[in-house]
Image (cartoon, helix red, strand yellow):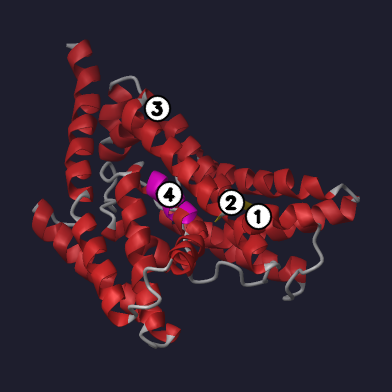
Amino acid sequence: MTSLAKQAPVRGATNSLLVSRLRDLALLPAILVLMIVGVLVSPSTFLTPENLINVLQQQTELSLLVLAEALVLIAGRFDLSLESTIGLAPALGLLVATYLGLPGIWTIPICLLVGVLVGLLNGLLVVRGGLNAFIVTLGMLIVLRGGVIGFTGGKSLFNAPPEFFYLGSASWLWMPASIWICAVIFAIGMITLGFFRGGRSLYAVGGNVDAARAAGIRADRVLLGAFVVASFLAALAGLMLAGRLGSVAANQGSGMIFTVFAAAVIGGISLDGGRGTLFGALCGVIVLGLIQNILVLAGVSAQWNQAIYGVIILIALVLARLTSGKSQN
């Protein structure tokens, strides 16, 4: 009896994963249609290697944030503070290393450490403190945003060592290093969630946390790990964004959380937890990147992007409601 109880959540998580993989394929025709529309809008520019690489590079930071949010959503929680972590971590890492007189290479581990600490604090408040994840991370978003403005005095940080900008500005094998980094991280994430017990535990906890505990899964540890890894990825995204732009803006990452949720939702990540794959989330990022690029090539103002993303979220939620047959809380 106990053995059957332990196998049930894992088997259910595996079935959910298979269904999610089939849903992921639904975005491939949409990507193909967008490619055709892009060619029609701008035949001489859209399919050039420079334009396609530019599309991928501009989505690298967003893709890491979407991956981070997807991990937390699959575990059945929210993390809104990722939007502020992408700005706070590089700013604080740079300021601390400069204040202590450390070599430039130290800005990177300090930045990543800030991300880990933010995720750890979020996780402890939610898991150990029993607080609502949505409210905790919303409060953390506000605190961190205010912290960035306070630390920087509301000004952008330009004078940084070359090592600080390396991940966002270097090129490996004729491609921006950030694209390779994102590809490797997504591959690791897909393999971990698809083939390792730790990844399947994430689905089990997000699907039914009580059943997961009954099956012997350390749910609190899984949730805490999801928050820490998510904030670590947000800090890494902050480093790459600073490197690509050549500075750390006081409002870096502001408003990105809406786009993150748009990509995750249209990529099939369930807001109820326990469903969705990283491949689907990546396809969601590519869809948004192509839409943004086509709008630019068509001469549509970037001021319309947020409105368009909002419409996409609503359409994706309605489609998910119709295909799943379940109401969304």
Q: Calculate the distance from the C-alpha at mark 3 to the C-alpha at mark 1.
A: 33 Å
Q: Amino acid at mark 3?
A: Gly
Which comes sooner in the sequence, label 3 or label 2?
2
Disc ID at residue 170? 1
Where residue 274 appears, x then y in whole percent? 27, 41
Q: Calculate the distance from the C-alpha at mark 4 to the C-alpha at mark 1.
A: 22 Å
Which comes sooner in the sequence, label 2 or label 1?
1
Q: Calculate the distance from the C-alpha at mark 4 to the C-alpha at mark 2.
A: 18 Å
Left or right for 78, reference 136 = left
> From the viewer's perspective, is the residue at label 4 or at label 1 nearer?
1
Residue identifier under label 2: 177
> From the viewer's perspective, is the residue at label 3 or at label 1 nearer?
1
Where residue 184 appears, x then y in whole percent? 49, 41
In the image as oriented, which residue stretches furthest toward the front? 44
Tell me which residue sits at (57%, 48%) in the image: 173
Q: Is residue 93 visible?
A: no
Whether label 4 touches label 2, CB < 8 Å:
no
Whether label 3 touches label 1, CB < 8 Å:
no
Q: Which residues are magenta?
A: 64-72
Which comes sooner in the sequence, label 3 or label 1?
1
Residue identifier under label 3: 198
Left or right for 325, reference 265 = left
Residue identifier under label 4: 67
Tell me which residue sits at (79%, 45%) in the image: 106
Q: Amino acid at mark 1?
A: Ala
Under circle 3, the secondary element is helix
User: Quadrant location of residue 170?
Assistant: bottom right
Which comes sooner in the sequence, label 4 or label 1?
4
Q: Amino acid at mark 4?
A: Leu
Q: Is residue 138 visible?
A: yes
Q: Calculate the distance from the C-alpha at mark 3 to the C-alpha at mark 4.
A: 16 Å
Confirm whether the magenta stretch covers residue 177: no
